[in-house]
Amino acid sequence: MIVQVVVDVPTGGTDRLFDYKVPTHLQGMVESGMRVIVPFGPRKVQGFVIHTSNESDLAKLKEIDEVLDVTPVLTNELLELGDWLTTNALCFKITAYQSMLPAALKAKYKKEVMLTNHEYLQELPIEVREWFKHRKVVDWEELITSGDKQLLVLVKKGVTQGLLEVIHKVNDKVTQKTIRVVEPVSVNSLTNQLHQLDNRALKQKRVIEYFLDNPEPISVSALMEQTDTTRSTIKSLVDKLVLTEKEVEVMRDPYVNRRFKKTEPLPLTAHQQDVITPIFHSLIEHQHQTFLIHGVTGSGKTEVYLQSIAKALEIGKEAIVLVPEISLTPQMVQRFKERFGSLVAVLHSGLSTGEKYDEWRKIHHGRVKVVVGARSAIFAPFRNIGIIIIDEEHEATYKQEENPRYHARDVAIQRASYYQCPVILGSATPSLETYARAKKGVYQLLEMLTRVNQVTLPAVEIIDMREELKTGNRSMFSKALHEKLSDRLARGEQSVLFLNRRGYSTFVMCRDCGYVAQCPHCDISLTYHQTSRSLKCHYCGHQERMPQTCSSCNSEHIRFFGSGTQKVEEEVAKVFPGARVIRMDVDTTRKKGAHERLLTQFAEGKADILLGTQMIAKGLDFPNITLVGVLAADSMLHLPDFRASERTFQLLTQVSGRAGRHQLPGEVVIQTYTPEHYSIDLVKNHDFHAFFEKEMGVRRLQSYPPYYYITVIQVSHPEITKVIDVTEKITAYVRRSLSDQSVVLGPVASSIPRIKDRYRYQCMIKYKNEPRLVEILKEIIENYKKETNQGTLQVSIDMNPYVLM
DNA sequence: AGCACGCCGACT
DNA sequence: GTCGGCGTGCTC
């Protein structure tokens, strides 16, 4: 038996299949989709079995060393999907497969040096002998960290002489958590013991009575709690051979301490019914179709998701639900857990490696039928997918910004077409690409343009901050926002203040010479952080003390400009003394669970104002919020990215949607310096359609998606001349190779021309149809392979960039 | 990635 | 005449 294996060596040269023989003792244990350990050159590496067969073109084959799995970790469908990823995201096969699995399954490599025979010790040079005096095996890592270059040379010599041997080890990162459980040996022994017990042994009696009622195994700690006993009581029963102890593998459950009360499907409104009917049809008829639910905030999309999933489960299938970043929307998880209970697995970045692995295993073993998760949950190892749902479809987090640079939406559609099942994309503000496809009929458009229960969309007021300045208002709150905030405070209603920035202020500038504090490693200005009284770089983490004087002209008039969440918090305290504020940004939610805790406090009415950045823009649904204030609507409008207008409109619409979702009507105040810009003005009437038409016109003029596809090749290197040289060559090559239908721009400096002391240049390709593009791009990667391997040069290619930076 | 092979300059 | 630099190429 022969197996074809992809090895864990992510380079161009090894990005293919290698044949191995299966030794007799492993025959019948290997299937495609399993992980194996194979000898590769002088060492051992992990690999994935892609095919099995009976012949090979090569005469002499090595044998596989070990089989790591009992059942395949990759189904045939996922193996195929990996192939698709390599061409569509331009990555190595091994990278594709690894990104489908939890990190716990990735191999850990270790190199050791062993003294082959104790008698050889005397023959080793004195420096080496020291290391092997008291042990046979030394970690390679230890030798390296000793910093002794001569030592390494001597060790290598010892290896060639046969005195020492190098051992390559491959370890699984898998960590299975176990707990001690006890159970009765038999019911008889329980009753026997009960009669023999000393009258004073009240605690033992209680334990035995517990087991007579519940004979199944229980963890020692739970038993102690249940029977109010201590470890010693249980120990003595174990010693008397009444109970037995054993180690049981347990699943870590991140939501273990949470109670979810079961909810029943809600009656659907007429709109919801109209939307769900075609979805049910597609489900029942096993038709692959992509639906776009364009539903305004509060239109009841989640209930449609829940009932569609229920339908999929009813016909014996599984469901995947993607949400932007799950730890950010505990409310969403709760709704799924409440409806489907223990059938739900949750996958997101807030979980530990072990927790992620356990959630993954629940899916792999078929113990759950629904997975709710962030981007990578799209690779959930289900075998019979009935429906895939992507909520907030327009969110940029669905695009992975490192290899493999896939978009979860594309993967979803690929998987759904394999299983012939529906995909549902949902959003109040669909991405232009998606909405354009829906209008063309590639996706089926389903609209829900009113809120449930006749709740009206909030009234939006746009405030021109230039006018405020003219009337002498120099505070960060406009007159209108100030009045409305005091009004809510007086009425005991809650408000949300949204600011698209963190930290205390955006940048530090000298009022005399105009000098702006810059990061020494990146071409970006530093941000002032009040708590540490320091300047931080948000790209490389560089930190320095806030200067007292300008480092350029020594003036003392150095001040911060703009306003971050910290500064707003101070300002609110000054203007509205007594108002209770909860601030949510990256700094206050860094700790595990902090996000949820703050939201719970707000939900319980422990604060009047929720002040935050992006993370409060979506998913919040609290009945008492009646006012939303956006402090600086244009902060992201002027970014050098063709999606800047789209993002601004989406964000403003999403934030506005937080207000007045229940009985109390909502109001929104948007402060801006460019009220006339369409992406701000059109938020006023919640007019997505007008925005779509307007923005499509802009995209057409500038040849951007959805009219053209784009691919960005980015080059970085510590020396600017090198970067320009390489980017020029690449650009010229691309220009020469593509048809004249396509537009090749560059080379130009990236919008942040330097990060972490590396200069960055790029070339942008706009095209409609270039069948040879992937091939050309692969040639480029291959051509610079040597230099990129050495680590100095980086060439990264993104075939559908979401954030141009 | 790791490692061997192989071809040029500076040493005993 | 040999040791060691790292460019090149291979790993079933």
Image (cartoon, coloured by chain):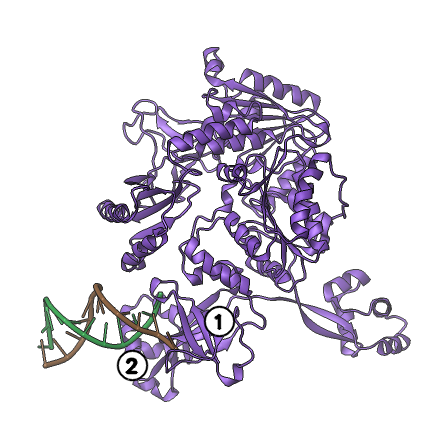
Chain colours: A purple, B green, C brown
- Pick whichever, A111 or A193, lies toward us: A111
* Residue depicted at x 46% and y 30%: A695
* Sequence-first tag of 1 and 2: 1
Q: Is residue B9 above or below residue A637?
A: below
What percent of the width, then of the height, locates residue A213? 86, 67
Residue type at the position of mark 2: Thr
The nearer-to-camera label among 1 and 2 is 1
**Residue A191, quarter of the rendered image:** bottom right
- Tag 1, which secondary structure? strand
**Numbered label attached to residue A51:** 1
Label 2 crowd (10 A; few <14 / some 14-19 / many >=20): few
Q: If the image is split into quadrants, where does the C terminus of chain A sit?
A: top left
Q: Chain of mark 1?
A: A
Q: Are marks 1 and 2 on the same chain?
A: yes
Judged left or right of residue C11, residue A209 is: right
Q: Is residue A710 above or below residue A461?
A: below
**Numbered label attached to residue A160:** 2
